[in-house]
Image (tube, rainbow, N blue to C red):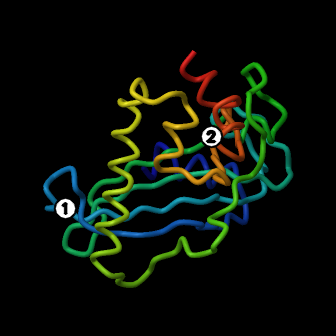
């Protein structure tokens, strides 16, 4: 991680700030709740002062959206998966390689409720409820043929006033009908 990402990133960006919007940790369902993982999502904000991965610097503020997953053992990080929205950084630098996206281009904010940073314990029942909802949402993707249409499919688990903060290349959408028109239908097509 240090050589492949952090050293080049911190060489290219000065005055870097980690601007977290989401943080939580807990046991992982995938391995029968044996391992503990932490999740962090937000932006790394800095001044883009030197080339990074072939992207020319702007000498302006830049925000690299990231999602980080870290497995913890004995109070130490032993495994990390880091996902960065490099296409979004390229757009900010005026070097975008893809055709126009279907959704809006924005810097994605954290949750509207401003409650995405869970740094302390929470009720186990609340975590179990959230995990169950996520699993049902994922499962519903495979059941869309039994619905009268995409609106019914999404209405099972999504509020009509939902906001989709997709990565660069997809973009953001607001409301179920716009999500279908600007993301789901083009993606499935």
Residue 182 quadrant: top right
> Residue at 58% across / 36% down in the picture?
151
Residue 141 quadrant: top left
Tell me if residue 102 comes above or below residue 171 in the rendering: above
Judged from the image, the secondary structure of the residue bearing numbered disc 1 is: loop
Left or right of 152, for residue 170: right
Image quarter in which the C terminus is found: top right
In the picture as drawn, the residue positioned furthest to the front comes out as: 148
In the picture as drawn, the residue positioned furthest to the top comes out as: 189
Cβ–Cβ under 8 Å for marks 2 and 1: no
Q: Position of residue 45 (x, y in %)?
A: 70, 60
Left or right of 170, for residue 147: left
Q: Residues within 10 Å of mark 1 (few under 14, many from 20)?
A: some
Left or right of 49, for residue 65: left
Query: Of the numbered discs in the image, which one, if any, rests on residue 35?
Result: 1
Tell me if residue 26 comes above or below residue 78 in the rendering: below
Front residue (pair 107, 47):
107
Q: Position of residue 38 (x, y in %)?
A: 36, 65
> Residue at 82% across / 56% down in the picture?
61
Tell me if residue 151 comes above or below residue 74 in the rendering: above
> Residue at 63% across / 73% down in the picture?
113
Tell me if residue 11 comes above or below residue 122 in the rendering: above
Residue at the spot of label 2:
167
Q: Position of residue 160 (x, y in %)?
A: 64, 50
Q: Residues within 10 Å of mark 2 (few under 14, many from 20)?
A: many
Query: Of the numbered discs in the image, which one, if any, rests on residue 123?
Result: none
In the picture as drawn, the residue positioned furthest to the bottom comes out as: 120
Front residue (pair 40, 180):
180
């Amino acid at each position: 991680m240090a050589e492949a990402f952090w050293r080049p990133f911190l060489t290219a960006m000065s005055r870097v700030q980690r601007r977290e919007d989401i943080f939580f940790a807990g046991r992982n369902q995938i391995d029968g709740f044996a391992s503990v993982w932490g999740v962090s999502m937000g932006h790394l904000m800095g001044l883009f002062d030197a080339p990074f991965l072939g992207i020319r610097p702007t000498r302006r503020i830049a925000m690299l959206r990231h999602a980080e997953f870290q497995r913890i053992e004995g109070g130490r990080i032993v495994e990390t998966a880091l996902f960065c929205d490099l296409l979004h950084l390229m757009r900010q630098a005026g070097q975008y390689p893809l055709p126009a996206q279907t959704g809006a281009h924005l810097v994605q904010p954290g949750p509207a409720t401003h409650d995405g940073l869970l740094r302390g314990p929470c009720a186990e029942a609340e975590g179990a409820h959230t995990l169950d909802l996520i699993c049902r949402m994922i499962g519903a993707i495979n059941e869309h043929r039994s619905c009268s249409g995409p609106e019914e499919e999404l209405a099972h688990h999504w509020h009509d006033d939902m906001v989709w903060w997709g990565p660069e290349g997809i973009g953001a959408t607001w409301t179920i009908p716009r999500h279908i028109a600007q993301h789901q239908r083009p993606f499935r097509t």
